Amino acid sequence: MNQLRAYLRPETCIFIVLWLGFLAVGRTQLFRDPGTYWHIVVGERILDTGRFPEVDEFSFTCTNQPWLATNWLGEIAMAGVNRWLGFDGLLLMLATMLAALYAWAAHRLIRVGLHWSLAVVLIALALAASVHNWHVRPHMATLFALALTYGLLLDVDSQRRSVPWLLWLPALFLLWANAHGGVLGGLATLITVLTGWIAERFLGGSSPLKEPKHFLTCGAVLALCCASLLLNPYLHRTLLLWLDILGFDLPDIIQEHRPLNPGELSGMGILAFGLVFILVLIGVLPQWPRIAWLVPLLWLSQAWARNRHGPLFAITALLAIAEIMPHTRWAAYLTRKGSDWFQPPAEPTRLGLRPLLLPLVLVMTALLMQSTRLQVPLLGHGWVKEDSLRWPVDLMPELERLSKTSEQPVPIFNDMLYGGYVIYHLPQMRVFVDDRCELYGNQSLHDYAEAERSQPERLSEWQKRWGFKLVLTENGSQFDRYLQGREEWKELRRGASAVLYQYGGPR
């Protein structure tokens, strides 16, 4: 029995349950974002040509206008996995990384004395605050990189690791900066913690900065992490673009940019876990909390402003709770009562290699099944299915036929939702709009949003300007209702999620 327990630690079971759950639910749910599609195409272009895009090649409204593939590293990774294993491989990659991330967070909670069942509850709350913004996209790199960054900062803060360990961060930031612009949030987190350590050092607190060389190390780490933002194919232009995007007003256009809504499940999840974190933090009073412990509050405020930051708050809160809990009155009370809910370990526990063996076998088995095209539910090839209620899957035969009617790229007016889908599946077509917000700009996006919401007649103005003869829009949308009453537009086919129209000219 003891041998079995060595291989089946609670963390192992948590990984397996999460991994299988992500594979099951992610079959369609992790592929609901249009960015998944065009990110893969960009990665394919880079792999095929060896060049990094400088201009738009996918739309007819912004053709040859400046556009930079700032997420190029993540896009190449997605394209490489897609070439090898298709969407099944992308799901396997993300499910494995997510399960490993939250199992690691659970390990940090359990090793300080928290019962595994309470760790599971906290993980469940974190998932509820996060799942709304999980997609197969490069932005997931920010979730993992922030967790590694903050985890290392907490380890140094608690003096489990020495200050020189921070010298690993510039390498991480270099990869992060070439995968996703969320590295700016990582830099803000790093600056917050380093500033807190300096303040604690001079105010007599328990700072890990004990010697002058520690200050020099932190200065070097910060300087190198800042420099990493410029080490990319586009140099300083990437940073300027990220700063420009931060100023975009997108809540009415893209759902993930909306403020937290307590009436939605994602908002409820963020608020619920936020209250739990604050309750844990209150438990250290009247002792003043360490600055590093307060980082999740910064991300909670960001999640309040834009719900896309919910997962970043949740993972930092999980890691912080593992540090805070042993110092709380709640832990002291449970220890005095001899409760199983919290028992401080006699000595630090290490995970070891044996608990990793079964997860490794499962992942390698799935990898083997997919690479040999063995069709097995959950683990094998052909598991991922495009949701026909989300994407115009049933319109593809007609769209493919129309895309081949000309030797020149065929322009098509599309809802923003379908932009990435068309870019991926119909390379001979050029879209009206997609979710590359930095390309289209604030004003154009707001004009589109107003037309989509209440002014569909703008479509006729755009048709006269651009000359497109095809429209792909959601069933029941304002554009759909408008075109139904126009004699010059013919409905070609109506599917489960979308309808396709063709222009026949004035009558």
Image (cartoon, rainbow, N blue to C red):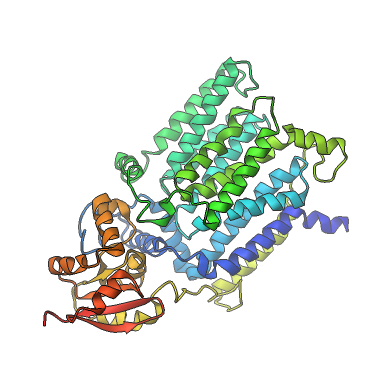
> Closest to the observer: 26 or 303?
303
> For residue 210, what is the image quadrant?
top right
91, above or below 282, in the image: below
Q: Residue at x 58, y 67 (%)?
A: 25
x and y, in percent, of residue 45 in the image: 33, 62
> For residue 460, what is the image quadrant?
bottom left
> Closest to the observer: 98 or 173?
98
Q: Residue at x 63, y 30 (%)?
A: 157
101, above or below 195, in the image: below
> Closest to the observer: 42 or 398?
398
Q: How many marks?
A: 0
x and y, in percent, of residue 405 in the image: 21, 81
Task: Please indicate, yes or no, whether residue 350 appears anywhere in the rendered image.
Answer: no
x and y, in percent, of residue 278 in the image: 63, 38
Task: Please indicate, yes or no, whether residue 91 appears anywhere in the rendered image.
Answer: yes
280, above or below 364, in the image: above
Which residue in the rendered view is the most extreme toward the left? Answer: 507
Q: Residue at x 18, y 82 (%)?
A: 487
Instruction: Point out the image quarter for the C terminus.
Output: bottom left
x and y, in percent, of residue 203 in the image: 59, 16
Q: Is residue 194 left or right of residue 325?
A: left
> For residue 147, what is the image quadrant?
top right
> Closest to the observer: 145 or 309?
309
Q: Residue at x 80, y 42 (%)?
A: 342
Instruction: Point out the image quarter for the N terminus.
Output: bottom right
Q: Is residue 265 left or right of residue 354?
A: left
Q: Is residue 195 left or right of residue 17?
A: left
